[in-house]
Image (cartoon, rainbow, N blue to C red):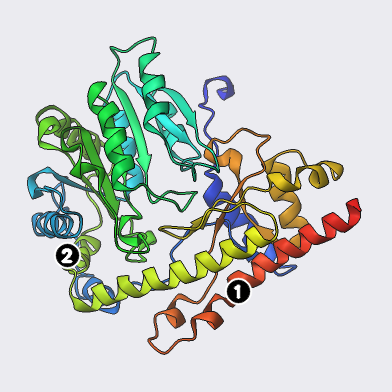
């Protein structure tokens, strides 16, 4: 019996796939692995120690999450973000990715609004949940930020305004590395409130705002904002798979029971040892505070140096404001690339990988039009352990990243010489 016609068109995640492709190619040549976005920093020692101490914990924990952990998470976000997080409305999940999907799965019908570019998994998740997806295109000139005017125009023209509208807003952004300021958020909130938009504010990189000035959307739109975060980025614990979500009081009565229902029928609970260890991370003692401050310093220095060198080569790149991503735009090289038969980001990234040994993710993976010559660069191929040392030479730490940027620029120089 053939089942092919009934299978969903869901493919391997682009971010995970590029990691595997880069590893395979590395066996035969040097590869600058800018494709996979994983924190290069080790988990803080005291947090890892706490995991070891609780390795024998084997019992199922409450679906919503361990109560002392939810209390620590709520206190952490009240202090760090100035928002009203309450433990009884915190949900702990196996990474923020699945928490975001749980929200989508809780609705029988909804429209999901995404920004282009935005993280690769939002759209497949929306389709898995059976929802229509709409996109709003941003530009390099706006540093890939959604404007209130764009959002207003879309909402005013909706054909089915009676359906719930779920906007996924991610900042500091993956893939852009840019973020929103207070005035921009407040302008967006005016539209969100007018049209009763439900927002999933994916603030997983909030603690890695390079200046420590992250502003949660929940400050300005508390009644309609679900905030997600977790340990994967600021605590370097991606593989631990621990994410958190806060449900606002205005939505908790109806939505939180549905989210708990999704959780109970899918992941049951997050790993017990990880939850106990996470309490230590979210307690945010002096050593962990110093760790985060150093992360911000290192990521800002390396990211800005990489962006500057790309801009010098005529590749328009917004300076990063958080996280560890750049979103370079090769549009100024369009004519030279076209002579090589390169007309879009997929072809561009294939050529860079095969000819320059540089692994980037194409803009198409993030919802960008195929002809746009944009790609995501994750500048994490440096020694995170060394970078945390107080006497480390950060220019030396940055060398693997800058060497990869040099490989891109050299490839472009050769391209220009061929076209001359």
Tell me if residue 71 comes above or below residue 30 in the rendering.
above
Of residue 380 and residue 173, the one placed in the foreground of this image is 173
Q: Tag 2's secondary structure?
A: helix
Determine which quarter of the picture holds residue 140. Answer: top right
Instruction: Name the residue furthest front.
Output: 183
User: Is any part of residue 238 visible from this angle?
Assistant: yes
* Residue shown at the point (55%, 45%) measured from the top left: 14
According to the picture, the residue beneath numbered tag 2 turns out to be 279
Asked if residue 380 shows in the view, the reply is: no
Residue in the picture at 68% in, 42% down: 346
Percent x, y for residue 99? 29, 42
Instruction: Describe residue 40's horizontal placement relative to residue 226 as left or right.
Output: right
Q: In the image, which is nearer the foreground, mark 2 or mark 1? A: 1
Numbered mark located on residue 400 in the image: 1
165 with respect to 269 (left or right): right
Is 116 drawn above or below residue 328 in the view shown? above
């Amino acid at each position: 019996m053939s089942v092919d016609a009934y299978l969903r068109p869901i493919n391997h995640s682009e971010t995970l796939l590029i990691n595997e492709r880069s590893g395979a190619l590395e066996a035969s040549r040097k590869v600058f692995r800018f494709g996979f976005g994983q924190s290069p920093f080790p988990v803080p020692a005291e947090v890892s120690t706490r995991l070891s101490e609780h390795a024998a914990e084997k019992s199922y924990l409450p679906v919503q999450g361990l109560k002392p952990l939810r209390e620590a998470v709520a206190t952490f976000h009240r202090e760090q973000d100035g928002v009203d997080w309450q433990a009884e409305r915190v949900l702990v999940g196996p990474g923020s990715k699945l928490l975001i999907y749980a929200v989508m799965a809780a609705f029988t019908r909804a429209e999901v609004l995404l920004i282009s570019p935005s993280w690769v998994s939002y759209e497949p998740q929306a389709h898995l949940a059976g929802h229509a997806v709409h996109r709003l295109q941003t530009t390099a000139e706006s540093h890939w930020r959604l404007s209130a005017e764009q959002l207003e125009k879309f909402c005013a023209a909706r054909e089915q305004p009676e359906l719930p509208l779920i906007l996924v807003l991610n900042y500091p952004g993956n893939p852009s590395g840019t973020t929103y300021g207070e005035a921009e958020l407040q302008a967006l909130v005016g539209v969100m409130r007018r049209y009763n938009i439900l927002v999933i504010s994916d603030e997983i990189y909030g603690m890695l705002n390079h200046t420590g000035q992250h502003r949660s959307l929940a400050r300005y739109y508390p009644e309609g904002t679900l905030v997600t975060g977790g340990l994967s980025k600021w605590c370097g614990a991606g593989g631990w798979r621990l994410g958190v979500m806060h449900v606002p009081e205005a939505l908790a009565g109806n939505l939180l029971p549905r989210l708990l229902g999704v959780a109970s029928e899918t992941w049951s609970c997050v790993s017990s040892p990880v939850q106990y260890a996470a309490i230590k991370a979210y307690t945010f003692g002096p050593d962990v505070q110093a760790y985060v401050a150093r992360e911000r310093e290192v990521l800002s220095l390396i990211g800005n140096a990489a962006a500057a060198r790309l801009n010098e080569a005529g590749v328009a790149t917004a300076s990063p404001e958080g996280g560890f991503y750049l979103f370079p735009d090769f549009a100024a090289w369009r004519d030279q690339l076209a002579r090589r038969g390169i007309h879009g980001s997929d072809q561009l990234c294939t050529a860079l990988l095969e000819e320059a040994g540089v692994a980037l993710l194409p803009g198409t993976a993030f919802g960008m039009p195929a002809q746009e010559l944009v790609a995501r660069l994750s500048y994490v191929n440096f020694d995170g352990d060394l970078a945390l040392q107080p006497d480390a030479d950060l220019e030396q730490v940055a060398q693997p990243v800058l060497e990869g940027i040099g490989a891109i620029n050299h490839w472009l120089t050769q391209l220009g010489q061929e076209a001359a």
